[in-house]
């Protein structure tokens, strides 16, 4: 549904629903053939690769045909994958029972005479049986492979009871009790009750399973030995089916849709098919087709087509970008703690040399460390697919070659961002180191300044002593001996004071040089920091420009220019001015 509450013509990544049967094109032959098998067989196995549209075929192809027949009751069951982390969970058999809508027929109280309050699946459905008003129960198990993820005990109880329902007129345990009671009391049941008891329940079953999981059906083969006897393989769309699936939903007039009727230009249809088509089989996967068509419909809804009501080749743009956006959304929907590991798996291990490369599931679980529940989520999203390998296990790979380019682009962007981040961290570490050196130089300069001040104090003391010696010389004439001694002392202090003055001057010169050196280093560091910041912002601007986000790119270029405004002599200053003019 759109924000307006109206439905889309193309479901995108989800399956079609039954009320969307009028939009389900390209599968009319498959729907009719599967319907005929359901009419003629008791059990049918529907299988196909992931992403080919099994659920859509059931919901919008098969069910509308079945529901035209009044005597069918549909019982749809999805088991969901088993989660070993849950201590309490709903068992598969309980999930089947929960879907039953049975009205107990008072005439079936004879069952209480045989086994009171028996809790089997057969017993529950037998209680609702009416002679002359027989209805056929059609069980549909979509994603049947999910059952096979449960503990063996749960699988056993399901297959035993469901086999009794399908294949036994009266289950062996009930027949055994009945025979003993009839031996003791031949009149236990009336003729009408015996007739109702021996009238089989009318049941049919459709099992839908991914083709890569079919080997796991051996877990139920002991109770369903003929499960592979009647099957239907759903294959990818051929070109004619794909064209119908693209063009017809857009043309529909009746119905409340998010978009008005619109058309695809012929070259657009051809472009979609050529982009998605398998080069060998010339077939197209439904999942990817619906993803592209939904993107086109969104353009129409948002009024982003050049011509109203028509999707052109220019409107659609690069189909790879559609898958790129889906890739980003798929990653964002995963738990945050697994996103990087999944991204690294897809970008670095499932694509090698520009080619899809399958990886054994056991390797992903044990060596890469991605849990099973995350693998299942990626398979359900149809971004990845699983195939059987020669060892009996599964290999995981990208679902289609069309995903290689957007994934590779995301990988290159991620590596560029990681490089920028690494360089930023290095620049910050270098700036810290230089700042520490600067502070050390300032501390040393302070020490030298203090020393110079001490020398200056000594020089002042020497000047005072020198003045005193000169005064003493004026009074030395009266006493010759004292005068000589005073003269000698005066000369001595004079010499010492001159030395102190020279030493103090030398220390002052050294301190001045040290201070000049510290100030110069500080200016160079500030200049280097400004250059580093400008280069970083320029890198972000280039990335936004590559993504055609020109407004954000210009913003980053202006921030970079502002950071080096004090250094117009730098080459990057003119480069940034040029980039702003080019935008």
Image (cartoon, rainbow, N blue to C red):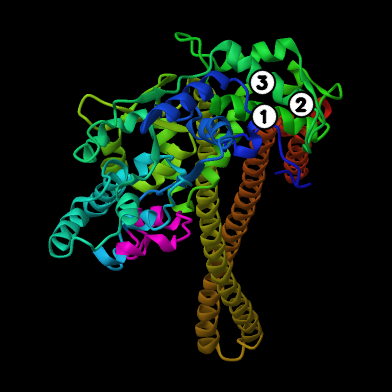
Sequence-wise, the earlier of marks 2 and 1 is: 1
Asked if the residue under mark 1 is in contact with the one under mark 2, i.e. CB atoms within 8 Å, the reply is: yes
Name the residue: 73% across, 10% down.
266
For the point 64% across and 26% down, which residue is it? 292
Instruction: Identify the disc placed on residue 23.
Output: 1
Label 3 sits on residue:
246
**Magenta residues, as a range?**
85-111
Q: Is residue 470 above or below residue 266?
A: below
Label 3 CA crowd tier, 10 Å (few <14, some 14–19, many 20+): many
Q: Helix, strand or loop at disc 2?
A: loop
Badge 1 element: helix
Task: Please tell me which residue is depicted at 75% across the width and 39% down the height of the picture.
Answer: 552
State the separation of the CA atoms marked 2 and 1: 8 Å
Quadrant housing residue 498: bottom right
Q: Is residue 402 magenta?
A: no
Q: Are marks 3 and 1 in contact (CB under 8 Å)?
A: no
- Which residue does the image show at 60% across and 38% down from the upper left? 18
Using a 10 Å C-alpha cutoff, classify the residue at mark 2 as few (fewer than 14 neighbours), some (14 to 19) or many (20 or more): some
- Image location (x, y in percent) of residue 512: 62, 58
In this rendering, is residue 500 above or below 143?
A: below
Residue 87 sits inside the magenta stretch: yes
Judging depth in this view, the residue of 418 and 247 nearest the camera is: 247
Question: What residue is pinned by disc 2?
Answer: 252
Earlier sequence position, callout 3 versus callout 2 = 3
In the rendered image, is residue 370 in sight?
no
């Amino acid at each position: 549904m759109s924000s307006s509450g109206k439905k889309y013509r193309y479901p995108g990544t989800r399956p079609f629903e039954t009320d969307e049967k009028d939009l389900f094109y390209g599968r009319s032959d498959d729907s009719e053939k599967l319907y005929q098998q359901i009419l003629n067989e008791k059990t049918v196995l529907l299988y196909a690769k992931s992403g080919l549209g099994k659920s859509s075929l059931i919901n919008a192809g098969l069910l509308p045909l079945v529901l035209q027949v009044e005597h069918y009751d549909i019982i749809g069951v999805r088991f969901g994958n088993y989660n070993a982390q849950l201590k309490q969970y709903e068992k598969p058999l309980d999930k089947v029972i929960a879907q039953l809508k049975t009205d107990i027929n008072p005439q079936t109280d004879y069952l209480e005479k045989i086994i009171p309050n028996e809790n089997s699946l057969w017993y529950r459905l037998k209680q609702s049986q009416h002679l002359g008003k027989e209805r056929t129960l059609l069980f549909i198990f979509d994603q049947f492979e999910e059952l096979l993820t449960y503990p063996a005990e749960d699988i056993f109880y399901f297959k035993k009871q469901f086999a009794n329902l399908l294949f036994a007129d009266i289950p062996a345990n009930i027949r055994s009790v009945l025979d003993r009671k009839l031996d003791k009391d031949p009149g236990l049941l009336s003729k009408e009750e015996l007739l109702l008891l021996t009238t089989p329940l009318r049941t049919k079953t459709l099992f839908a399973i991914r083709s890569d999981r079919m080997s796991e059906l051996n877990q139920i083969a002991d109770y369903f030995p003929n499960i592979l006897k009647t099957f239907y393989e759903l294959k990818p769309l051929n070109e004619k089916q794909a064209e119908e699936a693209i063009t017809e939903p857009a043309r529909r007039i009746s119905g409340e849709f998010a978009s008005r009727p619109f058309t695809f230009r012929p070259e657009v249809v051809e472009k979609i098919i050529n982009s998605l088509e398998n080069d060998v089989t010339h077939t197209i996967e439904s999942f990817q087709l619906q993803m592209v068509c939904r993107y086109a419909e969104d353009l129409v809804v948002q009024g982003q087509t050049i011509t109203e009501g028509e999707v052109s080749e220019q409107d659609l743009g690069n189909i790879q970008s559609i898958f790129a956006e889906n890739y980003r959304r798929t990653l964002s929907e995963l738990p945050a703690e697994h996103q990087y590991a999944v991204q690294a798996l897809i970008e670095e291990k499932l694509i090698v040399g520009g080619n899809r490369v399958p990886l054994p599931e056991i390797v992903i679980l044990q060596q890469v460390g991605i849990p099973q529940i995350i693998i299942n989520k990626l398979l359900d999203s149809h971004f990845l697919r699983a195939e059987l390998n020669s060892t009996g296990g599964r290999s995981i790979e990208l679902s289609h070659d069309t995903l290689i380019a957007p994934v590779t682009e995301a990988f290159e962007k991620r590596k560029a961002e990681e490089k920028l981040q690494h360089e930023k961290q290095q620049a910050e570490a270098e700036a810290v180191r230089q700042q520490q050196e600067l502070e050390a130089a300032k501390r040393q300069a302070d020490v030298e300044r203090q020393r110079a001040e001490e020398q200056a104090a000594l020089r002042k003391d020497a000047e005072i002593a020198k003045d005193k010696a000169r005064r003493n010389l004026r009074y030395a004439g009266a006493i010759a001996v004292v005068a000589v001694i005073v003269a000698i002392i005066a000369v001595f202090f004079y010499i010492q004071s001159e030395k102190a003055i020279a030493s103090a001057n030398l220390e002052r010169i050294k301190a001045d040089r040290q201070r000049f050196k510290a100030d110069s280093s500080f200016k160079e560091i500030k200049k280097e920091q400004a250059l580093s910041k400008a280069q970083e912002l320029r890198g972000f601007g280039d990335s936004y420009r590559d993504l055609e986000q020109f407004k954000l790119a210009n913003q980053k270029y202006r921030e970079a220019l502002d950071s080096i405004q004090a250094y117009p002599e730098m080459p990057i200053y003119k480069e940034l001015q040029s980039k702003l003019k080019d935008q």
